[in-house]
Amino acid sequence: MSPTEEVWWKKWDNAAKAMDFMNKGVELRFGDQKRQWFSRAKGRTLLVAVGTGLDLQYFPQELQLVGIDISWKMLEKAKEKKESSDSKTQLVRADAELLGFADHAFDTVVASCTFCSVPNPVKGLQEVRRVLKPGGKLIMFEHVRSNIFWMGPMMDWMTKVTRRFGPDLNRRTRANILQAGFQLTREINLYLDMVKFFEAVNQKKCPN
Ligand SMILES: C[S@@+](CC[C@H](N)C(=O)[O-])C[C@H]1O[C@@H](n2cnc3c(N)ncnc32)[C@H](O)[C@@H]1O
């Protein structure tokens, strides 16, 4: 890992302290919808970028869930939540761009404000596709770059600042999903065209 990359993932260690507080509004606004959407996860499920574990509450207790994250500090906080909730979720430190799991190891992959943060989202999504069974589902809750004419350029500009401490605001996630070789089956706007649910299927032939 190069020194620059090391600095990159340490920003997430720093962000871990304030994450629960910063996300309170998101959970209040979208929590019920997340619970409904994430309940579509079936079988062995990978949660990519578990963060501090705020989303663990939205999954059925009996689900075989594996949560990964690049940041040790995020994982420490997720572990506290897991222990206080009796959840059987397995927590593992891993890079979304280089997942240490076998091909086709999961029935479902869930991502929640993940591909705004992974440095190379297409590489990460191709890796997700590798570990998903053919026909397996990718379920995502993500904020994306708006197509509203003045909003998109403003998000590009704001990202120059936000990416120093946290996520990019201008990811073109729909295009990234398609570029990674997924078949997009659903796209639902939750707030304007900026906060969305996506559902995609791993088509049978993996190009990577
Ligand atoms: C905006 S936070 C979202 C956390 C959580 N999903 C939530 O919604 O509360 C982004 C997360 O992505 C993680 N992350 C960033 N790059 C990653 C990578 N390459 N592999 C795994 N996790 C990564 C960060 O550590 C952080 O926990």
Image (cartoon, rainbow, N blue to C red):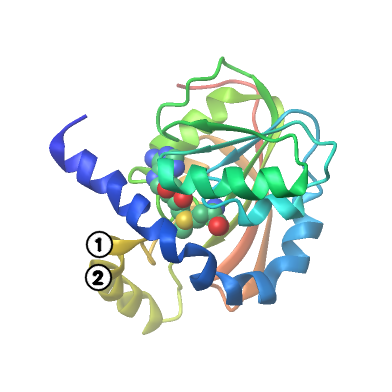
**Which residue in the protein does label 1 denote?**
164
71, 46: nearer the viewer: 71
Q: Residue at x 14, y 37 (%)?
A: 3
Q: Residue at x 29, y 47 (%)?
A: 10
**What SS does tag 1 mark?**
helix
Percent x, y of residue 207: 48, 22
**Which residue in the protein does label 2 denote?**
161
| Left or right: 148, with 81 as reference point | left
69, 86: nearer the viewer: 86
Tell me: residue 206, above or below residue 21.
above
For residue 79, which numbered disc appears in the image? none
- Farthest-out residue, bottom: 150
Q: Can residue 21 be seen?
A: yes
145, 91: nearer the viewer: 91
Tell me: residue 145, above or below residue 92.
below
Q: Residue at x 49, y 38 (%)?
A: 125
What amino acid is at disc 1? Answer: Arg
**What SS does tag 2 mark?**
helix
Percent x, y of residue 115: 46, 50
CA separation in Å, label 2 and label 1: 6 Å
